[in-house]
Image (tube, grey):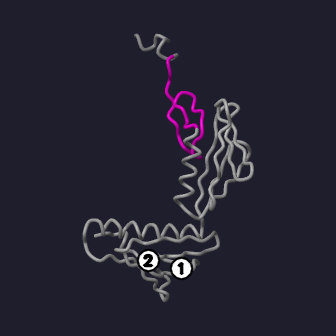
Amino acid sequence: MSRIGKKPVPIGAAKVSVSDGLVKVEGPKGKLELHVHPAMTVKLDSDKKELVVTRPDDERQNKALHGLTRSLLSNMVEGVVNGYRKSLEIQGVGYKADIKGQTLTLTVGYANAIALPIPTGVQVTMEGATKIHVAGPDKQLVGQFASDVRRVRKPEPYKGKGVRYLGEVVKIKPGKAFAGTGAATK
């Protein structure tokens, strides 16, 4: 029994329309749409202002799709009403980022600067030269672009230099210098 799938999705301030397996959600932060799997049925309850997802039977595949569909719809409503945001910080001497048009340029210790095109539906802002804020209504798109930025130069474990999520803790290793001090030989 899918516990998540049984919960209705509250709409709140969003405008929702359902027709032939296509769910469109519109709010102050943007518009999103989802093609629902043919096995799932989505109904809009205008009186209670909520979306209800139902499945045809208790097969394993349908149980999984039931919870997935409900979660995707919930994320869409949350995104168009409040939006999603990921923040990254760059650490390292001379490491910086810059936005030129629809391109994020990262200078993170390579011979050339790395240019990442900013996808449509995602807003990228800078705070100084080392803090990057990625925002938008689509949770998957915001998370994917933030992950792509971090992947350019992941934080390394010896000095901690690289691109990391704001507040991410990187465990620093002691390195070779500690092994030669003689403290471990006694």
Position of the C terminus, as image quadrant, is top left
Q: Is residue 158 above or below residue 28?
A: above
Residue 170 lies, in percent from the top left, at: 52, 37
Q: What's under tag 2, amino acid-wise?
A: Gly
The magenta region covers: 153-176
Magenta stretch, overall SS: loop
> Horizontally, is 28 left or right of 11 in the view?
right
Q: Are marks 1 and 2 in contact (CB under 8 Å)?
A: no
Rendering quarter of residue 105: top right
**Picture coordinates of residue 16, whole percent (x, y):** 53, 79
Instruction: Tell me which residue sits at (49%, 87%) in the image.
Output: 46
52 sits left or right of 32 in the view: left
Q: Residues within 10 Å of mark 1 (few under 14, many from 20)?
A: many
Residue position for label 1? 16
| Quarter of the image that includes the N terminus | bottom left
Residue depicted at 54% across the width and 32% down the height: 156
Q: Which mark is residue 32?
A: none
Instruction: Write the residue at 35% across / 67% down.
Output: 65
Q: Residue 27: where, in percent of width, then height?
A: 61, 74
Q: Is residue 82 placed above or below 23 in the rendered structure? A: above
Under tag 2, what secondary structure? loop
* Within-10-Å neighbours for mark 2: few <14, some 14–19, many 20+: some
Q: Nearer the viewer, residue 134 or 115?
A: 115
